[in-house]
Image (cartoon, rainbow, N blue to C red):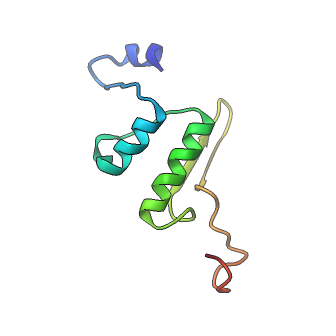
């Protein structure tokens, strides 16, 4: 991240944070973030937390971006197979 940020110095701002401080800041002042780049584990934890703040896991968007492909979906899927059946919490 630091190497790539150097290429865009003066055009983007980069900041390092530990995951628990980031989790707190996402609740207290989420507007300070435009994009969060993290490892898979920490991304999963933070996306679950944020989904809880906006209505649940099926409501928040997620992106898994790799060198050759990308998948965009609800954070943990929207479960269309059980939608409208009154069996999901």
Q: Is residue 37 above or below residue 59?
A: above
Q: What percent of the width, then of the height, locates residue 8? A: 35, 19
Q: Is residue 45 above or below residue 11?
A: below
Task: Give left or right: position of 3 versus 73.
Answer: left
Task: Give left or right: position of 64 versus 25.
Answer: right
Q: Is residue 78 above or below residue 45?
A: below
Residue at image location 68% in from the left, 73% down from the top: 80
Residue at image location 52% in from the left, 55% down from the top: 61
- Residue 67 versus residue 37: which sits nearer the camera? 37
- Residue 68 versus residue 29: which sits nearer the camera? 29
Q: Would you identify the image quadrant in which residue 11 lies?
A: top left
Task: Give left or right: position of 32 versus 18.
Answer: left
Q: What percent of the width, then of the height, locates residue 69? A: 67, 38
Residue at image location 31% in from the left, 25% down from the top: 13
Q: Is residue 89 above or below residue 59?
A: below
Residue at image location 62% in from the left, 37% down from the top: 40
Most extreme residue toward the left, as rendered? 10
Q: What percent of the width, then of the height, locates residue 39? A: 58, 32
Most extreme residue toward the right, as rendered? 81
What is the count of numbered marks?
0
- Residue 27 versus residue 38: which sits nearer the camera? 27
Name the quadrant of the C terminus: bottom right
Q: Would you identify the image quadrant in which residue 35 lies?
A: top left
């Amino acid at each position: 991240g630091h190497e790539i940020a150097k290429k865009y110095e003066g055009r983007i701002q980069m900041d390092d944070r530990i995951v628990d401080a980031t989790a707190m800041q996402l609740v207290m002042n989420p507007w300070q973030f435009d994009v969060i780049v993290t490892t898979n584990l920490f991304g999963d934890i933070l996306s679950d937390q944020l989904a809880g703040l906006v209505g649940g896991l099926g409501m928040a968007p997620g992106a898994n971006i790799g060198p050759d492909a990308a998948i965009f979906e609800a954070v943990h899927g929207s479960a269309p197979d059980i939608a409208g059946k009154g069996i999901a919490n």
